Structures are given as C-alpha cells and as structure tokens.
Image (spheres, rainbow, N blue to C red):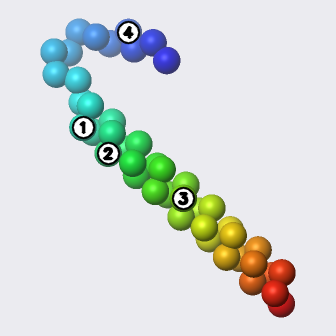
C-alpha cells in the first residue's frame, strides 16, 4: 500500500501499530470464540 501522504513530518507509527495489535487481538479472540463454539457443538 503506497502512502502518498508523506508530507507530515511525524508518522503516527505508534497509533498504527496499536490499531494493528487491536485488530490482531480481535481476530484471535474471534477465531478462539468460533473454535470454542464449534467444539461445543461437536461435543453436544
């Protein structure tokens, strides 16, 4: 993804990394939740 907005002298790298970590954590929680639900359905 080419970033054309390179005019700002301080890139919000910390904010971007925090957003990435938050999305990754949400994805992991979603996958774990789906796994638990599928396991519960399989055991039922």
State which mark lies toward you, 3 or 4: 3
CA neighbours of label 1 inside 10 A, class few (<14), some (14 to 19), many (20+):
few
Comparing labels 4 and 1, the label whose residue is closer to the camera: 1
Disc 2 target residue: 18
Q: Position of residue 20 (x, y in %)?
A: 41, 42
**Distance from the alpha carbon under mark 4 to that under mark 1:** 19 Å
Neighbor class of circle 4 (other Cα within 10 Å; few <14, some 14-19, many 20+) is few
Mark 2 or mark 4, which is nearer the start of the sequence? 4
Q: Is residue 3 left or right of residue 38?
A: left
Q: Secondary structure at mark 2?
A: helix
Quarter of the image holding residue 17? top left
Task: Residue at 37%, 44% (x, y): give it.
Answer: 19
Residue denoted by label 4? 4
Q: Secondary structure at mark 1?
A: helix
State the separation of the CA atoms marked 4 and 2: 21 Å
Q: In the rendering, at what x and y percent does residue 32 appear?
A: 60, 67
């Amino acid at each position: 993804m080419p970033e054309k907005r390179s005019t700002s002298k301080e890139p919000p790298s910390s904010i971007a990394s925090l957003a990435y970590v938050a999305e990754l954590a949400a994805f992991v929680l979603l996958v774990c939740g789906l796994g638990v639900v599928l396991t519960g359905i399989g055991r039922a």
